[in-house]
Amino acid sequence: MKMSNKGTMFMVQEKIKTYILIMLVISSLFFANQIWFGNKLWSSDYNFFSNWRKTDIQQTIANKEDMINPLRFVVNRGEFQLAYGKHQPTYHQLNTLLRDVYVTFFSESQISHEKVSLQQWQEVLNSRRPYYYIDFGTVSSVRVLGQIFGIRDTSISSYVQSLKESIIVPGDNLSANIVIYIKDDNDQSVNKFQLPYNKAYFEKLNEQFRHSLEIRHAFSFQLGFDTPKENSKIIIAPEILIPVVERQQTYAIQSENPLDIEKSEMREQILRAFQYTPNTLRQYVETDNTVVYTENHSTLKISPSGLIEYRALESGRGMRLTDANRETTPTVYDSLTMAINLMQSIGKINKHLHLTSDIIEDPNSPGVHSFTFDYYYNGHPILLQLEDTAVRNAIEIEIAQGTLRYYRQYVRDYSLKQLVTINVPMLNAVEEYYNRVNLYPEQMHIKQLGIGYIENGSDRVKLPHWYLKLMDEQVFHTIPAVK
Amino acid sequence: MPKWILGFIITMVILLIPVITFGAPDQLEVDASGTVTGLINISNLEQDITFEQDYVLRGSGKQSVQVTVYVYHEETQAYKQLMIINTEYLEQEEEPLIYPRQWKVGASGLIMQTIQLQEGKNRFKLYAQKDQDYEIIDIEITLLKRDWLQAIKDLNINIQQQINRFLPMSN
């Protein structure tokens, strides 16, 4: 009896040991996962697991394109033009087609090319035949643009250095070619290319636009507003689009600050994006409740107002964005990829952004690249007018030799509110500003002009405003568009 | 009549004289012409055909010039002021506001005004006035249907295709 009791007890003990052993193995696996892939106990310089991120090249390229897709397409309707921004379904329809044209174009190894005059460029824009004018909003190196479209080394870069605008003319059915005009921003020359392309889809689009009821526009040069006249005091840059209607409808919008420092998940995602280790941070709080973290020869500030700011304390010691063993100097394309990867890792707070700085290699500063991104919502730019006047762009990034030198982001999210009528015509707004600054009888040269929303940090509903930038100025001026 | 009433009437007449003298007339004859030129300059006068119902007048003018649009009426063989109905009032079921199509050139000197055309020939006069001077500009523009444009294009392509049948293809 005693023997069987002992045997039973032994069995029970063995079972308990087995259970404890299983629990220990499971818990060690769990904590190992936390340490290796979650909260790391050491900085990224020593943790080779920290680079085990999913590097989906296709996903990276798709998101890059989204931020540097054309700002707008302009479709010629004969005597007027129709403009399409990202908020419109037609934009995406056009983007799909014209992207295919660009990929075919950049892939060509041999292509018919000639230089034409600036006058011919304007004649094309002023003609009655269908064309598609593409405005990227910023100047891009043709080589980099080709890379973004998936072509490593486009032959087009031997003809054109950089571009911001181009025109695609489908032409008629008698020729198998479409014609592409590109204005080289480097020297303002105009290049004309003939590209063999199937025009079937263009014909379908042409028919669609023939019956469109979208707002009519005209280029400033078509109205004669781009050159000095005896009586006119305002000169508007030639390719600014001017709506020829007195009223138009659009949406008022609302902004909110999605950055909540109290939420640990959001805070930790930001910290990890900058390779800060949440468990071993040094931090302090400033008088305005901005939390300041210091680690890895850098500081990271997260403010309740929605500002994130990273600064490397010593040159070259900032967060590494690329392989430390890299031998070649990062190109502007490489740095742009790193910048967008970083923005993606910060989280879903990065929406409605568009690249607003030029993508050009500076031969005097190899490997050093700066980028700015701004919010665009409902097809219009969000213009920052904050108390801190140094914050002029939604995101500013500076990367040097693959390390992050500086990053600042003003975090905001936007939503549509009510429909409003813009009852102040564009020219009236321009005149109102002209009178306001009391320039008469001096002339005023406008280089940018359009509709935007002012972001001043409040949660109030934002009505559309006309904004303009003058030649040789960086600041914008605004006039209410709804009265 | 008491003196004060007489004085009041004389004062009102003196005040109203500039309006009576310098206001745009209700009607213009076909051969009406102005006293000066150069008050305004319309840059697209040469255009005589359009396929768009919205015709955009564009140009420049001297500051404070008041421009009134007149449209030709067949029955009276004269030009009358083009009147605009403010449709916002119609939606609110209030009495619609009707006013002449006119504007004043601002400090910028730029002109961009849209006029809606009727199908066929449209004849307008622009009456530009500053103080006692006025200038009259004639505009004639024909609105064609879009079908016309397509017919012209189709005819053009057909002719080209027929010609190309007999010509060698070039690379």
Image (cartoon, rainbow, N blue to C red):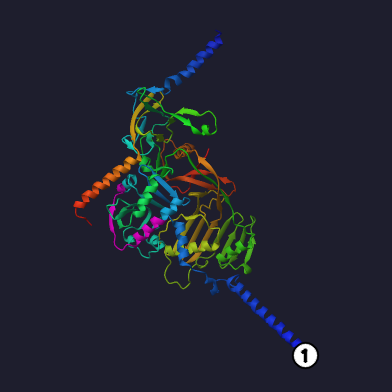
Residue A321 x %, y %: 50, 67
Which residue is depicted at the point 19% across and 54% down? B168
Residue B147 x %, y %: 34, 41
Task: Check the image and report above or below for A145 versus A4.
Answer: above
Task: Check the image and report above or below for A39 versus B1.
Answer: below
Task: Check the image and report above or below for A128 versus A95.
Answer: above
Does residue A219 appear to the left or right of A301 in the view shown? left
Does residue A308 appear to the left or right of A86 in the view shown? right
Residue furthest to the right: A1
The quadrant holding residue A272 is: bottom right
The answer to whether residue B150 is seen in the rendering is yes
Residue to which mark 1 is pinned: A4
The residues colored magenta run A96-120
Amino acid marked by disc 1? Ser
Q: Secondary structure at mark 1?
A: helix
Residue B154 x %, y %: 29, 45
Which residue is depicted at the point 60% across and 61% down? A266
The answer to whether residue B132 is seen in the rendering is no
Task: Check the image and report above or below for A181 versus A478.
Answer: below
Q: Return the residue nearer the eye: B54 or B155.
A: B155
Does residue B95 appear to the left or right of A182 in the view shown? right
